[in-house]
Amino acid sequence: MFIDLEEQYDKIYRYCYYKLHHREKAEDITQEAFLRFLENEHYQDTGKGLQYLYTIARNLCIDEFRRKPTEELPPDLPESTENKLENQLLDSICLKNALTRLPEEDQEILLLKYVNEVPAATICQIYNISRFTLYRRTTKSLSQLKEAL
């Protein structure tokens, strides 16, 4: 399985930023994840490259969390006060608030599946769960979000 590294770079960065809420740290960890990924050709050749890449990024994010106490950083807010942007901001805040009510792993699964468009089989391998479990957790999480919103 060939991985388009340029396409995956933005997705891995988005995943790291979601985990860390810090732009520079997410950039650093994304770069480190790709360096480690490219150093080991074994997983690239087995067809598990995408799973390996996300696992590296996830572990580096966990290591970063352990290294230093987390700081709550506010998200980047748009400067414009147009009505459309205000509504988008409110929707974003509501969605973020609703997402925080879900278990962290379920939040990650939704990010991987719907934002980064990672295939279900790869998500199942990353979290060591069956397709049925993935389906059940996704359905439950989406219904919880719908109820909260």
Image (cartoon, rainbow, N blue to C red):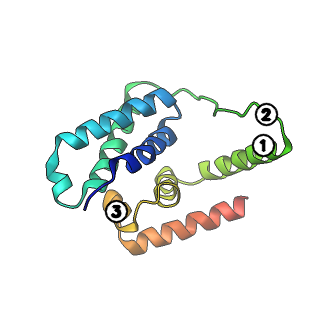
**Where on the picture, by quarter, is residue 145?**
bottom right
Q: Is residue 74 above or below residue 47?
A: above
Q: Amino acid at mark 3?
A: Thr
Q: Are discs 2 and 3 less than 8 Å apart at CB?
A: no
Which residue is located at x 50 percent, y 50 percent? 104
Q: Position of residue 75 (x, y in %)?
A: 63, 34
Q: Position of residue 100 (x, y in %)?
A: 60, 48
Please tell me whether mark 1 or mark 3 is closer to you in this view: 1
Residue found at the very far left of the displayed protein = 42
* Picture quarter with the C terminus: bottom right
Exactly how many numbered labels are in the figure? 3
- Marking on residue 80: 2
Which residue is located at x 40 percent, y 67 percent? 120
Q: Amino acid at mark 2?
A: Ser
- Marking on residue 120: none
Q: Position of residue 106 (x, y in %)?
A: 50, 57
Q: Position of residue 136 (x, y in %)?
A: 49, 72
Q: Are discs 1 and 2 less than 8 Å apart at CB?
A: yes
Task: Give the residue number, with chain letter if any, for mark 1.
Answer: 85
Which residue occupies the foreground of this view, 7 or 140? 7
Task: Give the residue number, with chain letter if any, for mark 3.
Answer: 122
Which residue is located at x 80 percent, y 47 percent? 87
Q: Amino acid at mark 1?
A: Leu
Q: Residues within 10 Å of mark 2 (few under 14, many from 20)?
A: few
| Distance Cα–Cα, label 2 vs label 3 | 39 Å
